[in-house]
Amino acid sequence: MSAPPLRLGVNIDHVATVRNARGGKLPDPVRAALLAIEAGADGITAHLREDRRHIRDDDMVRLKRELSRPQLAKPLNFEMAATAEMIGIALAAKPHAVCVVPERRTEVTTEGGLDVVGQHLALAPFIARLNDAGIRVSLFIAADPKQIEMAAQLKAPVIEIHTGAWCDAVSEGRDEKTAVEWRRIVDGAVQASSLGLEVHAGHGLDYATAETIAALPQIVELNIGHFMIGEALFVGLSQTVRLMRAAMDRGRAKMDVRA
């Protein structure tokens, strides 16, 4: 059985983090996005937070404009919280996709998956409006059976599995925790695919974990940011994208259709 395509979405938030640390216009996250696409990325992800700590409104406008050019035509994945302000921005910008994530001002990064079970009444009209506008909706959730089932009931066509707990366990050498979290991801991917959901994954992935998770046939997209921007400081962004693509390709070659 041939492997389905595996897409790489590059999150350019932390290019903007560096820019904002000093102010001004440089380094430009839009330039980073174009370099990533040129090196082999399939799309760009950006998180417009309520506090605008990295990506800003004008970045989203410029990203949409540049990625929509006919000679490029690559998808923009707009990460955002489920708020009235953000849905207004999304409906005006019309990105290819919106990934709904949990958000707290005090967090350094997204700390867990969205609780779609507890928030389903609020999320249902939010998702419906985006679906009606032709914007593909993804829900960033843990690989939990109840969360996955609710995502399907809410008619979100895509889920993105939060891989942070697994990646942390791998990096800390906690073998038992690694095995438990990996099983959750495998089972969650299978369940989501069986419900007709498109399955993505992201958070904390590096070359090694991306290569491992690429072997899961149900997963069709990885979204990776912090690690790649960090690596780019040493080898350049283009080389980092190429190395990540190579790791994903190695993993896809090991795909186990029985997983």
Image (cartoon, helix red, strand yellow):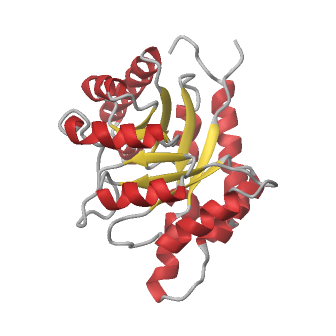
Q: Is residue 131 left or right of residue 125?
A: right
How far across and down, in percent of the image, does residue 7 sit? Answer: 64, 39
Q: Is residue 114 visible?
A: yes
Q: Quadrant of residue 2?
A: top right
Residue found 61% across the figure and 60% down from its top: 64
Decide: is 210 above or below 154.
below
Residue furthest to the left: 118
How far across and down, in percent of the image, does residue 193 sit? Answer: 47, 19
How far across and down, in percent of the image, does residue 143 sit? Answer: 34, 30
In the depicted view, which residue is nearer to us: 187 or 83? Answer: 83
Q: Is residue 151 left or right of residue 104?
A: right
Residue furthest to the right: 71
How far across and down, in percent of the image, does residue 236 sit? Answer: 69, 67
Residue found 39% across the figure and 18% down from its top: 191
Q: Is residue 166 visible?
A: no
In the depicted view, which residue is nearer to us: 72 or 203? Answer: 72
Q: Is residue 75 left or right of residue 197?
A: right
Decide: is 237 above or below 212.
below
In the depicted view, which residue is nearer to us: 223 or 228? Answer: 223
